[in-house]
Image (tube, rainbow, N blue to C red):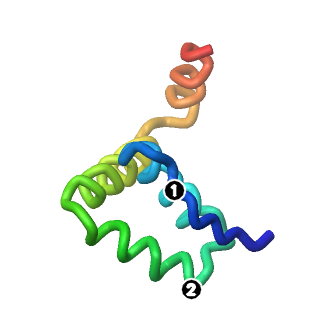
Amino acid sequence: MHTENTNLPDTIPDAAAYWFARVHSGNFTAAERERFIAWRSEHPRHEQEYRALDQIWQATSLLPEDDLRELLEASD
């Protein structure tokens, strides 16, 4: 699937989540990469929000699988 969404979500956290999902989708295009780099450099908060998501993603890899599963089930 080829995705070239030119309409980013309205809020910075939502836009960061959109980009995070695209980067990790396995279908991230060269054109998207250019737009992503431009978005990150537009404002310091863009970079901060994206890095915060990345840190959360990395932190989950440190949790034992059973603990992570328990946390996910508790949020239901």
Can residue 45 be seen here? yes
- Counting residues from the start of the chain, the first of labels 1 and 2 encountered is 1
Q: Secondary structure at mark 1?
A: loop
Circle 1 residues within 10 Å: few <14, some 14–19, many ≥20: few
Residue at 46% across, 82% down:
34
67 versus 37 height, above or below: above
CA gap between label 1 and label 2 equals 17 Å
Residue at 56% across, 20% down:
70
Q: Secondary structure at mark 2?
A: helix
Three-letter residue code for mark 1: Leu
Image coordinates for residue 24, horizontal then vertical, percent: 57, 63
Most foreground residue, 1 or 38: 38
In the rendered image, which residue does mark 1 sit on?
8
Image coordinates for residue 18, horizontal then vertical, percent: 53, 53
Most foreground residue, 29 or 68: 29
Residue at 23% across, 53% down:
45
Instruction: Give the residue at the far right of this rendering.
Output: 1
